[in-house]
Every structure is written in structure tokens, then in C-alpha cells.
């Protein structure tokens, strides 16, 4: 009887140990926001991060000639720090394609895009000229692209894309949207705030 009691005692001890130390359960990992992975800054690139709220402006100096600007529930712009007053006020839109559709510069819930689609579209790629002279060259080509069907101008889109330009990328790392009101289009909502990182490289 004494010998048979030992295995029973061991079994009771084993149950007690299991009760005090239950089997580990699988931990729930936090979900990652699209585009939240922040890459290394490429050699020679200009990199920075920021946050913008609806209707407010984030501005970052790029160099002595240009600023990066992001308007909450608006979009991205590269603006000259010293405009010459001759229709030269923004450097990116004139060379960022497509030119007849919603482009990566726009983060506004306009056209047929909801604010959810806007913040989930990341990273966003854009181009930028670097001077008012380059802007006017690009602007003239763009007007040809948009207004002419003449065969002799069929190479205009390729010439426009071949213009020297900086290359930019914006990643949306976190955001909050609302449908309590709309920024532009009824029913599309608004972006209350957005966090982002930017990388821009310009030709040397």
C-alpha cells in the first residue's frame, strides 16, 4: 500500500505544478500601420519626420532654395523660398504624373478617394524641379501635353518625364480619420492627424 501511494502522490504534485504554471498562451502582437516601417535614409538624401493636423501646415526647409510643405487634409508641395513673382510658386505638381488624375501629392479625400484610401496609400512618390527656370520649362511642356493632339508634340510627355528633377517619397506612419465632418467631398471624411516620414534626393 505504501508503494502504490507514491505514484498517486507524484501525480497530485504534477497537477499542482501545472495549476501554478499554466501552459503559455500566444501573445497578440500589435497590428502594424501600413507604411509604418521606416527605411534607412539613403546616402545623400534629405530625410525628416513630422506630424500634421487637419487644416494646419507642416513646413521643413530642404535647402537654401526650397521648402517642403504638407497641409493636413490637403497635400504635398515643394515651394521656392525666393519666388521670382513670375508664376513660380510650386515645384512638384508640374512634373509629378499622372497629370489628369489623382496623384500622390494629394492627400485630401477628393475625387473618388475616401480618407481611408488616402492614409492607406503609402509610400507616396513625387518629383520636383529645383528652380523657377526649370519650372517654366516643365510648365510649358505640361501645357503642350494637356492641350495638344498634334502629332509633332507626341514626344512631349517623354520630354517632360526626362527633365532633371528631384525624387521624393513620403511614408504615412500613423493617422486618425473621422466621418464626423468632411474636408472636401461630402461623405469622404477628413484626416484629423497624420504622422509621416519623408526622403528627398536631388541631382548633384
Image (tube, helix red, strand yellow):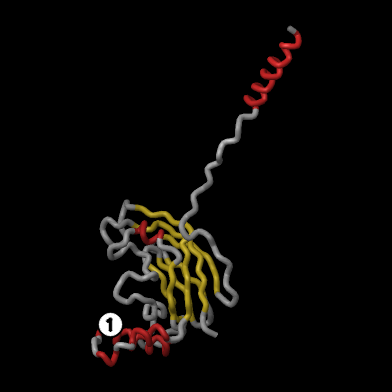
Identify the residue position indicated by label 1 in the image: 146
Residue 88 location, quadrant = bottom left
Residue 161 drawn above or below residue 47: below
Q: Is residue 47 left or right of residue 154?
A: right
Task: Point out the residue furthest to the top here.
Answer: 1
Tell me if mark 1 has few (under 14), some (14-19) or many (20+) residues whose alpha carbon lies within 10 angstroms of its own: few
Q: Secondary structure at mark 1?
A: helix
In this view of the protein, which residue sits in the foreground, 8 or 127? 8
Q: How many marks?
A: 1
Image quarter hosting the N terminus: top right
Residue 191 drawn above or below residue 62: above
Q: Residue at x 57, y 70 (%)?
A: 41
Question: Percent x, y for residue 125?
Answer: 44, 71
Residue 27 location, quadrant = top right
Q: Is residue 5 left or right of residue 188?
A: right
Q: Residue at x 44, y 79 (%)?
A: 128
In this view of the protein, which residue sits in the foreground, 5 or 201? 5
Question: Percent x, y for residue 6?
Answer: 73, 14
Question: Percent x, y for residue 55?
Answer: 38, 63
In this view of the protein, which residue sits in the foreground, 127 or 132? 127
Q: Is residue 196 left or right of residue 187?
A: right
Question: Percent x, y for residue 175?
Answer: 44, 56
Q: Residue at x 39, y 77 (%)?
A: 96
Amino acid at each position: 500500500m505504501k508503494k502504490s501511494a507514491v505514484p498517486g502522490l507524484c501525480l497530485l504534485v504534477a497537477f499542482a505544478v501545472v495549476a501554478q504554471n499554466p501552459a503559455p498562451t500566444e501573445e497578440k502582437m500589435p497590428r502594424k500601420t501600413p507604411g509604418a516601417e521606416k527605411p534607412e535614409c539613403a546616402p545623400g538624401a534629405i530625410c525628416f519626420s513630422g506630424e500634421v493636423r487637419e487644416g494646419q501646415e507642416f513646413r521643413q526647409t530642404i535647402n537654401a532654395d526650397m521648402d517642403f510643405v504638407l497641409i493636413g487634409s490637403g497635400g504635398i508641395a515643394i515651394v521656392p523660398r525666393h519666388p521670382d513673382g513670375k508664376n513660380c510658386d510650386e515645384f512638384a505638381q508640374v512634373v509629378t504624373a499622372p497629370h489628369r488624375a489623382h496623384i500622390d501629392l494629394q492627400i485630401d479625400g477628393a475625387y473618388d478617394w475616401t480618407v481611408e484610401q488616402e492614409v492607406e496609400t503609402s509610400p507616396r512618390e513625387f518629383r520636383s524641379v529645383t528652380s523657377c527656370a526649370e519650372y517654366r520649362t516643365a510648365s510649358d511642356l505640361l501645357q503642350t501635353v494637356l492641350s495638344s493632339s498634334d502629332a509633332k508634340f507626341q514626344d512631349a510627355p517623354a520630354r517632360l518625364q526626362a527633365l532633371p528633377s528631384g525624387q521624393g517619397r513620403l511614408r504615412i506612419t500613423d493617422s486618425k480619420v473621422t466621418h464626423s465632418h468632411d474636408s472636401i467631398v461630402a461623405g469622404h471624411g477628413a484626416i484629423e492627424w497624420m504622422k509621416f516620414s519623408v526622403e528627398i534626393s536631388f541631382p548633384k
